[in-house]
Amino acid sequence: MKIAILGSGIEVFTCGHRLLDKNPNLEIHIFDEKAESGMYGEEPGLYDEWPLTPINWVGSLFSQQPKEDSTAIRYSWFVKALSISLANRGANFHLKSIVKNLENGIVDFSGAGYLASGQIKFDHTIDFRENNSDSVWYGGVVISSPNAEIFGIRPDRTIEVWSQEENIEGNYIQKMEWRGKNPQYALIDRVNRGIEAAESTISE
């Protein structure tokens, strides 16, 4: 059975892992407009409990390997670790690829992936590309105690903060912008969204 997953977010990769947990013989194809999974853009990486996924889904996190007192992880590194592990499980990645049309299970795409362009027929397609939220959050990374209600401490001791106020006080080593409901729960919600999509696609 061939399944296509469209998108760039972390839910794409948790979906792929869960699908392969349910059936290791599936042929999984990821269509990602980015040149490299986790390459561009930081998004909320806050969490209450670790691990967020089965340990075998996650490759090496290097300096972002969570510690006992960690409450955040660098989102891009987490995505990259999940994607590398998924590739090692046999998933096919079409990177820097734009899906021009999706109809009747046929993915019409073009880009710089290993097939460059073409049309592929799939038994199931799972599309994570839509983000309809109008709520804008402003984030940043600091190295000292933040003046913000929503924050988490990364394993490298930097602090990730989020606010709906655009001008957050403090000296930032990085600034971010994200659209969504609540950065406090965004990471676990997206992890679970991918898992739930896999569960609904392949029944026991």
Image (spheres, grey):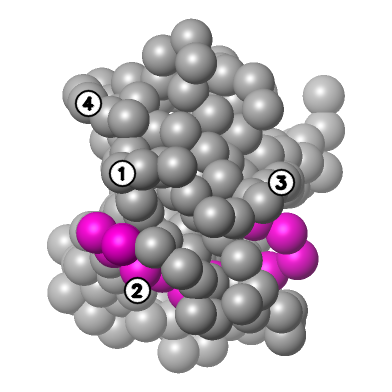
Vertical order, 164 against 149 (above or below): below
Front label number (2 vs 1): 1
**How far is mark 1 from mark 4, CA to CA?**
16 Å
Quadrant showing the C terminus: top right
Residue marked by disc 2: 33
- Nearest the eye: 20 or 141: 141
- Image point (45%, 89%), residue name: 100
Vertical order, 68 against 57 (above or below): above
Point out which mark residue 63 bears: 4
- Comes first in the chain, label 1 or label 4: 4
Residue marked by disc 3: 185
Residue 94: percent from left, percent from top: 30, 62
Point out which mark residue 95 bears: none
Tell me if residue 16 can be seen: no
Q: Callout 1, which amino acid?
A: Ile
Classify mark 2: helix, strand or loop. loop
- Comes first in the chain, label 3 or label 1: 1
Q: Callout 4, which amino acid?
A: Ser
Front label number (2 vs 4): 4
Front label number (1 vs 4): 1
Tell me if residue 161 can be seen: yes
Residue 126: percent from left, percent from top: 64, 60
Classify mark 4: helix, strand or loop. helix
How many residues crowd around disc 3 within 10 Å: few (fewer than 14), some, or many (20 or more)?
Answer: some
Q: Callout 2, which amino acid?
A: Glu
- Nearest the eye: 32 or 26: 32
Highlighted range, magenta: 171-183
**How far is mark 2 from mark 1, CA to CA?**
32 Å
